[in-house]
Image (spheres, rainbow, N blue to C red):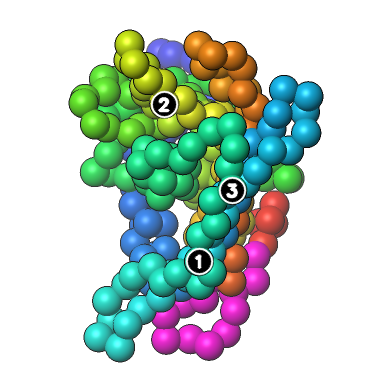
Amino acid sequence: MRVAAQANEPPADLVRQVAERETATQAARLKYLYRQTVRVEDFRANGQKAGEYGEVREVIFLPDGKREEQVVKKPWNRLVMIQMTEEDFRDIRDVQPILLTKDTLFIYESKYKGEEAVDGVDCWLLQVRPRQILSGQRLFDGMLWVDKRDFSIIRSEGQAVPQIRTSKSENLFPHFTTLRSKVDGEHWFPVKTYGDDTLYFRSGPQRMRLIVEYANYRRFGSESTIKFETGKP
């Protein structure tokens, strides 16, 4: 005989079910159009804003059905204290939305960290980190909030890794939080990523702020705008 499992005990295959749900979410999101707005701000030592970078892109479908990003507003770069790098843009595209799919599950190790409610949604709390990082990879290290009802990730907090330091240069990356909302009553898509962090360069600490917004989700072929549902069954 054995003691019966408590009602709040997570399933043994929690991570696998999360990956299966994320795979379905990724497939669904590929069928949607949306607008992505990026803003990065840097600050002087006295706390005053020094400059900013910004861009607005629309994810669209061409007449032949091909999906691509279209620049809506020409990027402006007035940063003073820091510079955007190729890795920053990769993180915005591939890491901050964090899709832990069946194809990427093997890259990460995970640990169950308890339960927590987010906006009225009961969640499993899951810590994930890379098993190893190969040259050129950009991966996620942080926490995931998983909806107990359908294993959807509804929130993530962490950092893109690795930090890149050489004898001649440094390329550092902020902690961030990505929030999701339910789209069309089924899938949870990213709606906002934000971070306000201090990066510790050898030359001294540097504060920066990141905001990425995803708006106006609408399914390809439909003129209707999808309404978000946050914290609802």
Asked if the residues shown at circle 1 and circle 3 are in contact, with their CB atoms under 8 angstroms apart, the answer is no
59 sits left or right of 211 in the view: left
Residue type at mark 3: give it: Arg
Identify which residue is drawn at 27% across, 76% down.
66
The residues bearing labels 1 and 3 have C-alpha atoms spaced at a distance of 13 Å
Which of the 4 image quarters holds residue 51?
A: top right
* Image disc number at residue 78: 3
Q: Is residue 210 visible?
A: no
32 or 81, nearer to the observer = 81
> On the image, numbered disc 1 is attached to which residue?
74
Choose the circle earlier in sequence order: 3 or 2: 3
Q: Residue at the location (59% across, 14% down)?
A: 204
Along the line of sight, the residue nearer the viewer: 29 or 80: 80
Tell me which amino acid carries mark 2: Asn
Q: Is residue 131 left or right of residue 38?
A: left
Does the residue at mark 2 contact the one at mark 1 (Cβ under 8 Å)?
A: no
SS assignment at label 3 = loop
- Front tag of 1 and 3: 3
SS of the residue at dot 2? strand
For label 1, the crowd category at 10 Å Cα-Cα, with few meaning under 14, some 14 to 19 and many 20 or more, is: few
The residue that disc 2 covers is: 171
Q: Which mark is residue 33?
A: none
Numbered range of the magenta stretch: 217-228
Which SS does the magenta portion mostly show? loop
Q: Position of residue 85 (x, y in %)?
A: 40, 39
Q: Nearer the viewer, residue 17 or 118?
A: 118
**Residue 79 in the image: x percent, y percent?**
58, 42
Distance from label 3 to label 2 (Cα)? 19 Å
Q: Amino acid at mark 1?
A: Lys
Task: Decide which of tag 2 and tag 1 comes sooner along the chain.
Answer: 1
Q: Quadrant of residue 217?
A: bottom right
Which quarter of the rendering shows the N terminus?
top left
